[in-house]
Amino acid sequence: MGLPARDEASEWVGWTVVDRDGTELGAVTAVLADESTGRPEWVYVEVEGASAVVPALDADGAEGRVTVAVTRAQVTAAPSVGGARELSTAQEADLYRHYGIAASSQTSETLLPAAAETGAAAGTGAPADTTPAADTIPAADTASAPDTAGSTGRGTVAAAVALAAVAGVGVVRARARARRPVVRQSWSQRLWARRPWAPRPPSRADLAAAQVRAVSAATAEGARHLGRTAAPLAVAAAESARHWAVRAGEEVRHLGRTAAPLVLAAAESARHRAVLGAEELRHLGAVASQAAVAAVARARS
């Protein structure tokens, strides 16, 4: 069956995944394609709240369900890749080894299932590296060779030369492919290359706008929360001020009621003392007058 078609796998996001025994695993969250060939290679599945990577080899999707060729036990025990939406060659090798799938890098710069590569070669014909034998040995020379006793030897030599030419071309092309410069791409570009049907990653302007919107929403929510909490506090403060004002008025009235009698008593005491002082003065004046009269009388006698 091999790897699914790209157009087919692009519709799997959101579909339910079941294993080969019919046990439900979870929903598809992403489909990763090989960078070199663009063929869907891995399926990300949400299993029990965690993200698991399932091979797309021999997977079949129809009517909202994707049936994979592995079991639930294999999926739950698969190596974890975290939340990354890109797999390194080492991670792919670990996953293929865990699922027991033979992998090869014959048609891809990273890894692909060997069964999928064999199917691709059978479906597209012989690779270009195996065709240039006619460039080395002309067809006319081989066709016009006489059918003699030495023709078998010459045919063998011609076949050996042709194979050497094919091997030489293959080696040259393999070396040229190995010497190809590595183009450094950002994570968003690599993610787009592995998921060409997914929405293009946001730009820096989009990220900045999203951050501004988030800050604005947080500020508005803070203002609403402050309004909800400040209004009761203001009412409580006003009520407390009114209570203290009433209490102060009561204390002033109580002080007025208790101070008035004290003032009257003090005034009465002062008046009484003034009267006593005047009586004493008159008494002293009378005594002094009598003493003066007695002294005059004694002086005359």
Image (tube, helix red, strand yellow):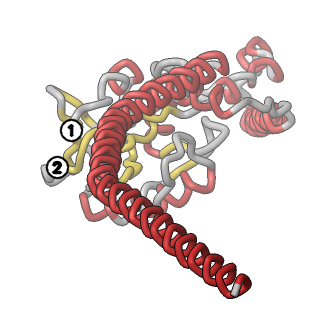
Quadrant of the image for the C terminus? Answer: bottom right
Q: Tell me which corner region of the image, top left, top right, bottom left or bottom right, holds residue 48.
A: bottom left
Q: Secondary structure at mark 1?
A: strand
Spatial CA distance of label 1 from label 2 is: 7 Å
Measuring from the top left, give residue 249's x and y in whole percent: 31, 44
Q: Secondary structure at mark 2?
A: strand
**Left or right relative to 223: residue 89:** right
In the figure, 74 relative to 92: above or below? below
Q: Nearer the viewer, residue 39 or 11?
A: 11
**Residue lying furthest top:** 140
Residue to which mark 1 is pinned: 16
Q: Nearer the viewer, residue 137 or 13?
A: 13
Q: Is residue 1 visible?
A: no
Q: Nearer the viewer, residue 137 or 103?
A: 103
Measuring from the top left, give residue 131's x and y in whole percent: 68, 23
Residue to which mark 2 is pinned: 24
Look at 62% across and 77% down and name the residue there: 293
Label 1 close to label 2 by CB (< 8 Å): yes
Q: Amino acid at mark 1?
A: Thr
Mark 1 and mark 2 lie on one chain; the one further toward the N terminus is 1
**Residue lying furthest front:** 301
Measuring from the top left, give residue 19's x and y in whole percent: 21, 50
Q: Amino acid at mark 2?
A: Glu
